[in-house]
Image: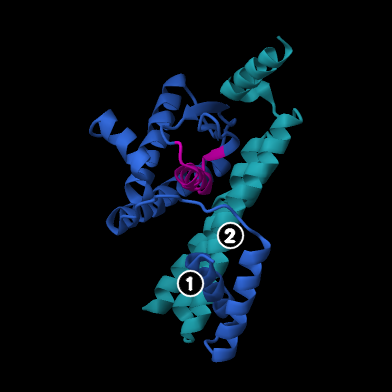
Amino acid sequence: MSDLVAGALLLVGAVLSLTAGIGLLRFPTLLSRLHLGAKPQVIGMVLTLVAVGLRTDAPLDIGILALTGLFQLVTGPVAAHMIGRGAYRSGLVRRDLLLTDELADDLADDRGQESS
Amino acid sequence: MRPVPLITLTALWVLLWGNVSVANIVSGLVLAAGLTRLSRLPPTGGGARVSPWHCLRLFAWFVADMASSAANVAWQAVRPGPQPPNAVIAVTLRTRSDLTMTITALALCAVPGSLITEVRRSTATLYIHVLGVRAESELERVRRGVLALERRVIRALGNAEDRRLLAEEGPAP
């Protein structure tokens, strides 16, 4: 039974990672690509870790698997945020593909206040 | 010396070694004491009231949301046809607490489809890059979702001030 569950989790994890790869090729902008690198890939990895945890016999191995997953979940978003922030501020954002951009408006307001 | 970081760091150390022994625990404690001394971080979560039940609910919601939006983004990646446009929206949270803001931002970031591009701490505003938005009306839905998430975080571990703000606002719609 645990074999079945672990196999299913591995499969789903692999498919999610695959879609992340496909999306990297297909999505047009840096920010939308970041979504894929930071998300389905991380979830795919967590599912893989759970599958490994189901099949391991040493209880303390589960600790290290949990730590790996936890650090992925905590550091992935921070890294994505820093890259996204840097990209945005250095003008690497395709504004024509954005429906609205409220950050640009607010940053423009800030600049207006500084110069006045 | 605060006990919580000390115990957490020691537990991390023992887990990394993968076996519980006196030597590991003692060396972990020494290391943790040294680290907390070297990097004097300001205390976070001042006055946070942790509610285990709401923490559990937050976690369950998080897992469910992650699953559904992972499927969503994965589908967007492989679906034929041109990609829908994205949007950057500003959502101002109610909270003034760093802990609540950080947890809300992390939970948002870990979930596919939303990416924090900028945070303004003075006004507790999150700037969120939303993937695949077809109409303005969808943005309203995302905005409400973020505020609902903040409500969950406050219920799980908000401080007294957060909870007061929430109570003033009345029951959830």
Kindly indicate the quadrant of the structure image that contains residue A16: bottom right
Q: Nearer the viewer, residue B6 or A48?
A: B6
Left or right of residue B65: residue B33: right
Q: Amino acid at mark 1?
A: Ala
Residue drawn at (33%, 33%) of the image: B165
Which residue of the protein is positioned furthest toward the front in this rendering?
B1
Which residue of the protein is positioned furthest toward the left in this rendering?
B171
Q: Which residues are magenta?
A: B96-115
| Residue assigned mark 2 | A72
Which residue of the protein is positioned furthest toward the bottom in this rendering?
B22
| Label 2 neighbour load within 10 Å: few <14, some 14-19, many 20+ | some
What letter labels the chain drawn in blue? B
| Label 1 neighbour load within 10 Å: few <14, some 14-19, many 20+ | many
Q: Which mark is residue A61?
A: none
Left or right of residue B53: residue A75: right
Left or right of residue A83: residue A54: left
Say if the magenta span includes residue A96: no
Scheme of image coloration:
by chain
Q: Split into 4 quadrants, where in the image is the N terminus of chain B?
A: bottom right
| Residue assigned mark 1 | A51
Residue drawn at (67%, 38%) of the image: A84
